[in-house]
Amino acid sequence: MTLRGRAVRRLARVCVALVLLLVVALPGCSRDKAESKPSQKEPARRPGTVPVAVAVVEKKDVPLELQAIGAVEAYMTVTVRALVGGELQKIHFSEGQDVKAGDLLFTIDPRPYEAALAQTQANLAKDRVQVQQARATLERDRSRVAQSRANLLRDQAQAKNAETQEQRYSELMKRDLIAREQYDQIKTNNDVAAAALRADEADIKSAEETVAADQAAVASAQETVRADEAAVENAKILLGYTTIRSPLDGRTGSLQLHEGNVVRANDSALLVINKIQPVYVSFTVPQQQLPQIKKYMADAKLIVSALPSGDPRPARGVVSFIDNAVDPATGTIRLKATFTNDDRRLWPGQFVNVALTLTTDANVLVVPAAAVQTGQQGRQYVFVVKEDLTADTRPVSVLRTQGSESIIGQGLRAGEKVVTDGHQRLVAGTKVEIRVPGGPARASGPGGGAPGGAPAAGGPAGPGDGGAAPGGPGGRGKAPGGGAERRP
């Protein structure tokens, strides 16, 4: 190979290497330009400052609440069933309609029951006539008894007179003052009178027995009438069951049977009616909360808020029921709250978020729960942003945390600003920049200081916002002072 050929090959290799370098370098240059565009709009952060989000310490009323998941229950539920069998002749409402107590719901064919009622009424009329006949017979036989007693009195007088004459004529005959035939006639009259007296007594006894039988017949006829009257009432009741009315104010559900179907007595359900004004919300709380609930419930009614899914406004009710036993399987106690439900936002079967308010702490200091940090010794503290925009650690005592807020007992004053985001890069004395949601951070120096800013809360971090205090290359240096992050 000649010297010229070697030079041409070397030149070709150099050209290929240059082309490859250009292909690799061009995407990087375009990316650097794209990344440099936002930095042209946002000034660089002042070196030595940390962007933070802050909140103001507030003084307000904070409720003590227990949170739970509850289910809405109808205040009353009635399952409508037919009490008599027959053809379902008419339905007088629409599914899902609101009904009042007494509104007509169903009509079952009444004709068989009307016929049964007419038959029982006819039997009653017939037996009432029999009662009248039995009473007439009784009165007749009582008259017979009275007549027999009158006859007895008459015959007793005649018998007494005949006995007296017989005694008188017996003395006369003994003295031979009268003939034997005359005495025998008087004695015969006396015997006839005595026999008539015995016949009257037997007649009275027979008449009295007849009267007793008549009284029994009257009583039997009266009992038959009472049975007929009961049968008439029963037939009326069964006829009344052919019209089914609503027993309460409520809302109807779906129909189980339609017109033309044959229903049987006490068989399948025809309809379910739910009373939804008022309404119950049932929920459970841990058994450990039961003493507190009983304590505060003894002083006043406990307010319950129920928030249905997708509804921005909670409904308010009061606790009306505490179960009589703790569920041993779950260790919870069931409570019910009553809601007037005037706007019908609560519906039976619906799940709701429940907040049971036990009491309210009035005029207490409140900070976001995210502002409270815990040190290595278990002590709680917050970062307070001072007037010169430097961070200061402040030990605090937290009385309790309710949701996203913590109630502070000691350590803060109303109006102070506490850090809620950006704690990881703070120590006492660190300069901070307060992030404004949706905009750049506020400058740390007077008049804005060096140009620069922090990203909005939750937005992408700017240069040097890599999780450590600025100072190192690429924002990966240590916290000010060169040491690790410090906690009080």
Image: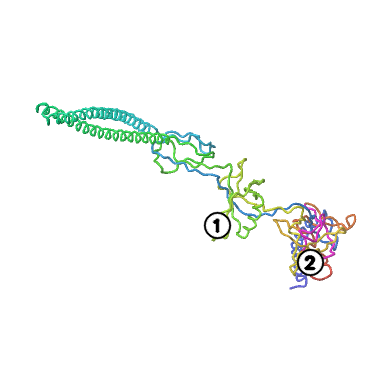
User: Horizontal placement of 88 versus 155: left or right?
Assistant: right
Task: Establish if 217 lies above or below 372.
Answer: above
Q: Earlier in the sequence, mark 1 or mark 2?
A: 1
User: Horizontal placement of 177 versus 249: left or right?
Assistant: left
Is 137 one of the magenta-colored residues? no
Front position among marks 1 and 2: 1
Q: Which residue is mark 1?
A: 325
Q: How is the image coloured?
A: rainbow
Kindly report the distance in space between the C-alpha atoms of the residues bearing marks 1 and 2: 59 Å
Q: Secondary structure at mark 2?
A: loop
Is 409 one of the magenta-colored residues? yes
Q: Quadrant of the N terminus?
A: bottom right
Q: Quadrant of the C terminus?
A: bottom right
Q: Position of residue 89 (x, y in %)?
A: 42, 33
User: Are the residues flagged by discs 1 and 2 in contact, CB closer than 8 Å?
Assistant: no
User: Horizontal placement of 389 versus 66: left or right?
Assistant: right
Please, what is the three-letter code of the amino acid marked with disc 1? Ala
Q: Position of residue 47 (x, y in %)?
A: 85, 62
Instruction: Give me the disc on residue 476.
Output: 2
The total of numbered circles placed on residues is 2
Q: Position of residue 104 (x, y in %)?
A: 48, 34
Q: Position of residue 418 (x, y in %)?
A: 80, 58
Q: Which residues are magenta?
A: 408-437
From the viewer's side, name the closer residue of 418 and 44: 418
From the viewer's side, name the closer residue of 284 and 484: 284
Instruction: Tell me the crowding category of disc 1: few under 14, some 14 to 19, or many 20 or more residues within 10 angstroms, Cα based.
Output: few
